[in-house]
């Protein structure tokens, strides 16, 4: 299973990068995990134009064959860790070889991008900085694979 995390911007904080590196290392037992960063445009003034540019860059990075794409979205489906682990197992059993997770920029993503994904996933009612969300997503992906592989990490 290939996992792509497609996200906007670079991580600047060492503690977040350290956490991401740790979970990326742990994930090598289960999958080929790649983080794909696209340029952040939000500093350019026109928020809607920035959202469109970032979303276009994200769409260019989505692999197409045997893939399933999940957008982290505040209006997405809520699911617990066990349910998401089961969902990923079902995807694997249907021949999906790559799952793309998308973390948009701080201003969101375009409607075109929202319409092009297979699933929208809501992590919480809370709001998280998108850089920290990358670490949270990495931890959850590791948790989902740990559940599927009966590794004690989950409990």
Image: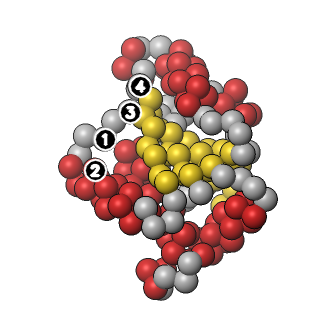
Q: Earlier in the sequence, mark 4 or mark 2?
A: 2
Residue receiving disc 4: 39
Residue 10 in view here: yes
Point out the tag, 1 or 4, that comes first from the N-terminus: 1
Q: Please state if 87 lies on the left or on the right of 138 as rendered.
A: right
Badge 1 marks a residue whose secondary structure is loop
- Going from the N terminus, do you reach mark 2 or mark 1 first? 1
On screen, residue 102 above or below 88: above
The 10 Å Cα crowd at callout 3, few under 14, some 14 to 19, many 20 or more, is many
Labels 2 and 1 touching (C-beta < 8 A):
yes
* Numbered mark located on residue 17 in the image: 2
Residue 63 is drawn in which quadrant?
A: top right
Q: Residue at x 51, y 75 (%)?
A: 146
**Residue drawn at (53%, 46%), measured in percent from left and top?**
4
Separation of residues labelled 4 and 3 (CA atoms): 5 Å
What mark, if any, has residue 9 been given in the picture? 3
Q: Position of residue 131 (x, y in %)?
A: 37, 45
Helix, strand or loop at label 2? It is helix
């Amino acid at each position: 299973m290939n996992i792509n995390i497609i996200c906007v911007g670079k991580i600047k904080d060492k503690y977040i990068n350290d956490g991401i590196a740790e979970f990326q290392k742990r994930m090598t037992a289960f999958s080929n995990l790649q983080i794909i960063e696209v340029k952040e445009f939000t500093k350019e003034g026109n928020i809607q134009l920035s959202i469109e540019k970032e979303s276009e860059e994200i769409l260019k990075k989505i692999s197409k064959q045997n893939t399933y794409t999940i957008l982290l979205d505040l209006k997405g489906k809520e699911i617990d860790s066990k349910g998401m682990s089961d969902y990923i197992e079902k995807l694997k059993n249907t021949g999906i070889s790559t799952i793309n997770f998308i973390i948009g920029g701080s201003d969101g993503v375009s409607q075109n991008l929202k319409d092009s994904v297979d699933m929208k996933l809501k992590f919480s009612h809370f709001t998280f900085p998108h850089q920290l969300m990358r670490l949270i997503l990495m931890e959850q992906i590791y948790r989902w694979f740990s559940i599927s592989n009966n590794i004690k990490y989950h409990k």
